[in-house]
């Protein structure tokens, strides 16, 4: 009886082994179908991690208004702000401090319920056409998702009365007018002037038109046309202009769903006209470009996936056929068409998207390999991720070489286009304004995207992770792109009308300011601190200038920036405000020999195995702080690169010798 029981148990065991073998075969075949690079972990382990992508490399953040936890990646504004705020509360020993980074929202168009705010706002046809004229000179230059003649035919057909006193409803026309009223709001005179009532009227018109368009669209949820996709995409732009990024993201998602239902991601059918084919392609790629911009801002996974897309890129169409003409806008200059910007901007967003996805996927692998939930906890993980970014980001740098010369804005002196050298732009007044705008916005977009990609490596000092040279290099690269962005926006607004009333520049400047504040907080005393502080002051003056043109987002950004700077000064005292030059960095001998009265030597701790304990700072430090300041030394470990100048100065993050601080070769040698 016992022997029979043992035989049955053996049979069960054999059946279990056979079942396990069968279950592992699909996984094995799947693993063979996807080549997997070798690593310290098993191939199966690495394969599993790579499928997690960005969803495994984020951070939980409480929502400012609801308190509900949100999940976003480390490149986002929300992540940088949250890490900065957390570190600032620790520095001030005030965990219950209100978040000074909170950016007040501009008046919301959602306050106008069910389009009722539109009543009594009916504009004359002359005024509407004045507003529409602004569209072709602004938004159409960057995202050509409307065809001029088709749209205007639609618009003219809406005026059914003989005296042109009443226009029929159209959600698409209303959202275009809302954008233009939002844009035209800035023309109406500075705040506090004799015309100060006009901006309020224009803003009311803009919100009313947006609300009315939204109400009209809500009644046609089952109707699918190209107009629906155009409406949602233009709504996303409108909401992003007033910093309602979550709402903008929702609009992009709605545009994407409608576009997929209409097959805009597929090669268009042969029975439609060439003009319509082109328009469908431009709309699809505009959704993709907007998705990259807004998803990066929010730290969310990209909505658009190109895996099953058969829609041709605009590059596949002959140049002569890519033009969507506007009768009242010159769209060609010396052989350069206005659509060239769109093509090159798309290439940039595609390169940025690929770089970001590759980076966060590698970070997920690193987290799995090190069995940690946050790669800031491990020096090895940080270095691994930094090495990965250096490779992932190469196609974004390479994009510069493919930009045609007419779209490159020159620099005064020896500076090259798209470099981080801080030489001023050479604004050529002899070329059309539309081409000047496209040049500047293309360069600003490039610096903004690179700043975002490098931004996770702005790290706050801890006692467990010391200096990591490549991580420090990335943080300085991030700072360099932030500084040159600030300089460009400030110069262009002062010297020309190129960026006048381009709302996108306000968003880019706020992104930059968040980065500068994070760097100033993480590194209150390093050779780059004075440049970061100077850039913040320039950003503040620029926000003030934009705010005087009735841009609420700029006024709110200026107020928030001043508030955060006050907290940083409270945490660090004169440490954060005094200029630091090479002469203020003490050698080890001067630290040992003694300090002047009233000064405190900041000896970088050597708790981490990869930290160089020989480096020290000596500076006036009037506030006692519990923080570990080991992370302040950004140059230590970079001296070999600086001496040999192995990196192309176009991409080199270290500022040139003619900038406010000077590198001392002997000093670097002492490091």
Image (tube, helix red, strand yellow):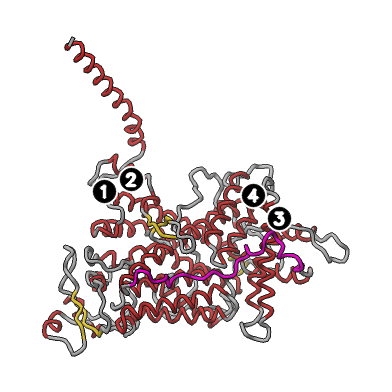
Q: Can you identify the residue that label 4 sits on? A: 277
Task: Name the residue located 66 percent from the left edge and 52 percent from the top edge.
Answer: 228
Please determine whether, in this image, residue 408 is positioned above or below residue 265: below
Query: Which is more toward the observer, 262 or 295?
Result: 295
Q: Is residue 500 left or right of residue 13?
A: right
Q: Can you identify the residue that label 2 sits on? A: 49
Label 3: few (<14), some or many (≥20) within 10 Å?
A: some
- What quarter of the picture does the C terminus occupy? bottom left
Residue 275 in view in this figure: no
* Front of the two marks 3 and 1: 3
Label 4: few (<14), some or many (≥20) within 10 Å?
A: some
**Label 1: which secondary element:** helix
Distance (Cα) linking label 3 and label 1:
52 Å
Query: Which is more toward the observer, 383 or 59?
Result: 59
Query: Which is more toward the observer, 15 or 294?
Result: 15
Q: Position of residue 604 (x, y in %)?
A: 19, 73
Q: Is residue 320 left or right of residue 84?
A: right
Please determine whether, in this image, residue 33 is positioned above or below residue 647: above
Q: Earlier in the sequence, mark 3 or mark 1?
A: 3
Quadrant position of residue 588: bottom left
Q: Position of residue 81 (x, y in %)?
A: 40, 67
The range drawn in magenta is 94-121
Q: Can you identify the residue that label 3 sits on? A: 216
Contact? badges 2 and 4 (CB < 8 Å): no
Q: Which mark is residue 369?
A: 1
Q: Earlier in the sequence, mark 3 or mark 2?
A: 2
* Front of the two marks 4 and 1: 1
């Amino acid at each position: 009886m016992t022997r029979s029981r043992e035989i049955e148990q053996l049979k069960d065991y054999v059946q279990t082994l056979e079942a396990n073998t069968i279950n592992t075969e699909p996984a094995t075949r799947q693993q063979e179908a996807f080549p997997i690079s070798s690593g310290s972990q098993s191939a199966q382990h690495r394969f599993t991690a790579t499928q997690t992508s960005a969803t495994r490399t984020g951070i939980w953040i409480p929502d400012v208004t609801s308190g509900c936890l949100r999940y976003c990646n480390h490149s986002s504004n929300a992540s940088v702000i949250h890490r900065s705020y957390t570190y600032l509360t620790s520095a001030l020993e005030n965990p219950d401090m209100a978040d000074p980074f909170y950016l007040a929202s501009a008046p919301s168009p959602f306050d106008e319920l069910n389009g009722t705010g539109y009543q009594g706002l009916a504009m004359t046809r002359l005024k509407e056409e004045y507003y529409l004229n602004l569209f072709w000179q602004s938004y159409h230059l960057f995202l050509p998702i409307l065809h001029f003649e088709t749209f205007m035919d639609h618009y003219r057909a809406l005026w059914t009365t003989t005296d042109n006193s009443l226009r029929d409803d159209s959600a698409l026309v209303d959202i275009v007018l809302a954008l233009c009223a939002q844009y035209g709001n800035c023309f109406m005179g500075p705040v506090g002037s004799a015309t100060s009532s006009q901006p309020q009227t224009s803003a009311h018109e803009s919100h009313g038109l947006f609300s009315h368009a939204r109400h009209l669209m809500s009644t046609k949820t089952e109707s699918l046309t190209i107009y629906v996709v155009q409406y949602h995409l233009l709504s996303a732009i409108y909401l992003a202009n007033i910093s309602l990024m979550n709402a903008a993201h929702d609009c992009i998602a709605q545009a994407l769903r409608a576009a997929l239902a209409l097959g805009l991601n597929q090669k268009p059918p042969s029975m439609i006209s060439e003009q319509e084919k082109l328009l469908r392609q431009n709309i699809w790629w505009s959704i993709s470009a907007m998705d990259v911009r807004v998803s990066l801002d929010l730290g969310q996974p990209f909505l658009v996936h190109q895996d099953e897309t058969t829609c041709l890129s605009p590059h596949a169409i002959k140049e002569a056929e890519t033009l969507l003409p506007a009768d009242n806008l010159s769209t060609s200059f010396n052989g350069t068409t206005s659509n060239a910007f769109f093509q090159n901007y798309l290439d940039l967003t595609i390169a940025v998207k690929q770089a970001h996805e590759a980076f966060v996927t590698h970070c997920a692998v690193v987290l799995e390999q090190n069995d940690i939930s946050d790669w800031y906890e491990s020096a090895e993980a940080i270095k691994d991720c930094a090495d990965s970014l250096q490779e992932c980001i190469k196609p974004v740098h390479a994009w510069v070489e493919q930009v045609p010369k007419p779209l490159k804005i020159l620099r005064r002196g020896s500076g090259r286009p798209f470099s981080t050298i801080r030489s001023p732009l050479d604004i050529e007044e002899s070329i059309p304004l539309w081409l000047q705008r496209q040049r500047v916005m293309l360069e600003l977009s490039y610096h903004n995207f690179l700043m975002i990609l490098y931004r996770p490596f702005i790290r706050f000092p801890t006692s467990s992770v010391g200096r990591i040279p490549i991580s420090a290099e990335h943080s300085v690269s991030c700072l360099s792109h932030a500084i040159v962005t600030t300089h460009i926006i400030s110069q262009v607004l002062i010297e020309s009308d190129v960026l006048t009333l381009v709302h996108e520049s306000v968003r880019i400047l706020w992104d930059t300011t968040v980065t500068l504040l994070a760097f100033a907080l993480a590194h209150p005393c390093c050779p780059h601190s004075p440049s970061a502080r100077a850039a913040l002051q320039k950003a503040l003056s620029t926000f003030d200038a934009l705010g005087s043109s009735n841009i609420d987002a700029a006024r709110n950004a200026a107020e928030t920036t001043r508030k955060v700077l006050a907290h940083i000064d409270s945490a660090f005292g004169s440490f954060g405000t005094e200029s630091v030059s090479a002469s203020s960095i003490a050698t080890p001998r001067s630290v040992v020999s003694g300090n002047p009265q009233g000064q405190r030597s900041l000896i970088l701790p050597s708790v981490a195995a990869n930290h160089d304990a020989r480096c020290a700072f000596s500076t006036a430090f009037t506030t006692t702080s519990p923080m570990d300041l080991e992370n302040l030394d950004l140059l230590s470990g970079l001296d070999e690169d600086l001496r040999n100048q192995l990196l192309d100065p176009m991409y080199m993050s270290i500022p040139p010798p003619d900038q406010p601080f000077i590198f001392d070769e002997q000093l670097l040698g002492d490091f």
